[in-house]
Amino acid sequence: MKKAHVPNRIAKRDRVILILSATLLFAYGTFCWISNHFFLPIQFNRGGPVGGIHLYGDAVWFMYGAVVCACLIMGSIVVDHYDERPNERHYTRFAKIMMYAGFSLFFLSVFAWLKASA
C-alpha cells in the first residue's frame, strides 16, 4: 500500500527568518558588488567584528555569486513550503547544486583575494 504524500511544512517564524535573512544578505551583497568592496568578517569579540578580509575586483564578483546561491537556497526552502506537489527531491537537488556552486564561488573569491594580495 502506497503511503500518502505529506508536503513539507515550515513554521511561520522560520519562514520569516529565512526571507529576512535572504533579503538582508542579498542587499549587503549587492551593495558590496556595486561598491566593489566586500568585507568578510572572520574574527569577532563582544563588540562586533574585529578583523576580516577585504575583497576587491574579481574576488567581489565570486563572493557575490556565492551570496546569490545562499539566497536562492533560503528562498527555495520557503517556496517548497507552499508547493504541495510530491517533488521535494527536486528542491533537495537544487539546494545541493546551489550549495556546491556557492562554496566553489566562495573559495574562488578567497583564491582571487590571495592572488591579488600576493
Image (cartoon, rainbow, N blue to C red):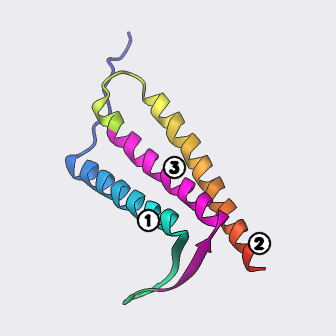
Image point (31%, 51%), residue name: 19
Q: Nearer the viewer, residue 6 or 99?
A: 99
Q: Which quarter of the rendering shows the C terminus? A: bottom right
- The amino acid marked with disc number 1 is Phe
Image point (66%, 63%), residue name: 58
Q: Main secondary structure of the magenta part?
A: helix
Q: Position of residue 31 (x, y in %)?
A: 43, 65
Mark 2 and mark 3: Cα distance apart in space: 23 Å
Write down the residue under mark 3.
69
Write down the residue under mark 2.
115
Q: Position of residue 96 (x, y in %)?
A: 55, 42
Mark 2 and mark 1: Cα distance apart in space: 23 Å
- The amino acid marked with disc number 3 is Cys
Image point (67%, 61%), residue name: 107
Q: Is residue 88 above or below residue 28?
A: above
10 Å neighbourhood of mark 1: few (<14), some, or many (≥20)? some
Q: Position of residue 10 (x, y in %)?
A: 28, 42
* First to last magenta residue range: 50-78
Q: Is residue 76 above or below residue 74?
A: above
Write down the residue under mark 1.
31
**Is residue 51 one of those drawn in magenta?**
yes
- The amino acid marked with disc number 2 is Lys
